[in-house]
Amino acid sequence: MFIYVIKSLHGNIVEEFRNLCDEIEIATALDKVDQFAEEQTLDVLSSDKTSIEDIKERISKEKKDEIELLKGLLEKTQERNNAMKARIEPLKQGEDFNDTRDVLTKVLLQVYVSVVLSSYYPSYFHSISWDLFCS
């Protein structure tokens, strides 16, 4: 009899539990939780997709920034090359030799004057300052 009461009580508890679960629709909620868990386990990389996309965007932005930097460096280098060409071209044609020729003429004239003066006035030559040649 004791066993019969225990089995009956157990059956009643199980039936009450099922009725309660049906009332609060726990089966539907558990099915949704199971479905969500299954989707998450099937899609292992679901959380990594956004980080992969972020990394992809960051790398793309870095590459674009580097390209812009290199373009700027290339433009500066081209400007320098053009400036060097502009300097070299007159040298090839001899136009910049006018300044050099003027300086050389001035130095030679000062040396000539010093030599002439030293031959006529030897004492004067010793008093000439070397600043004459440096001016």
Image (tube, rainbow, N blue to C red):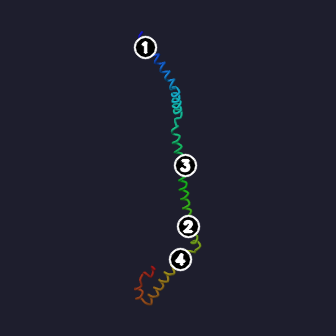
Structural distance between the alpha carbons of marks 3 and 2: 35 Å
**Separation of disc 1 and disc 2 at Cα?**
105 Å
Question: How many numbered tags mark residues here?
Answer: 4
Q: Nearer the viewer, mark 4 or mark 1?
A: 1
Which residue appears at 42% of the width and 86% of the height? Answer: 125
Query: Residue drawn at (44%, 15%), measured in percent from left and top?
Result: 9
Q: Residues within 10 Å of mark 2 (few under 14, many from 20)?
A: few
Residue furthest to the bottom in view is 120
Question: Where 74 falls versus 8 (above or below)?
Answer: below
Q: Position of residue 117 (x, y in %)?
A: 45, 88
Check the image and report above or below for 18 versus 115: above
Q: Looking at numbered disc 4 in the image, what kind of residue is underneath it?
A: Asp
Mark in the foreground, 4 or 3: 3
> Between disc 4 and disc 1, whose residue precedes?
1
| Pointer 3 local density, CA inside 10 Å: few below 14, some 14–19, many at least 20 | few
> Which marked residue is nearer to the observer: mark 4 or mark 2?
2
Q: Position of residue 73 (x, y in %)?
A: 53, 59
> Mark 1 vs mark 2: which is more N-terminal?
1
Q: Which residue is mark 4?
A: 99
Where is mark 1, residue-wise? 6
The numbered mark at residue 60 is 3
Label 1 crowd bin: few (<14), some (14–19), many (20+), radius 10 Å: few
Verify CB contact (< 8 Å) between mark 1 and mark 2. Answer: no
Q: Amino acid at mark 3?
A: Ser
Residue at image mark 2: 83
Label 3: which secondary element:
helix
Mark before the other along the chain sequence, 1 or 3: 1
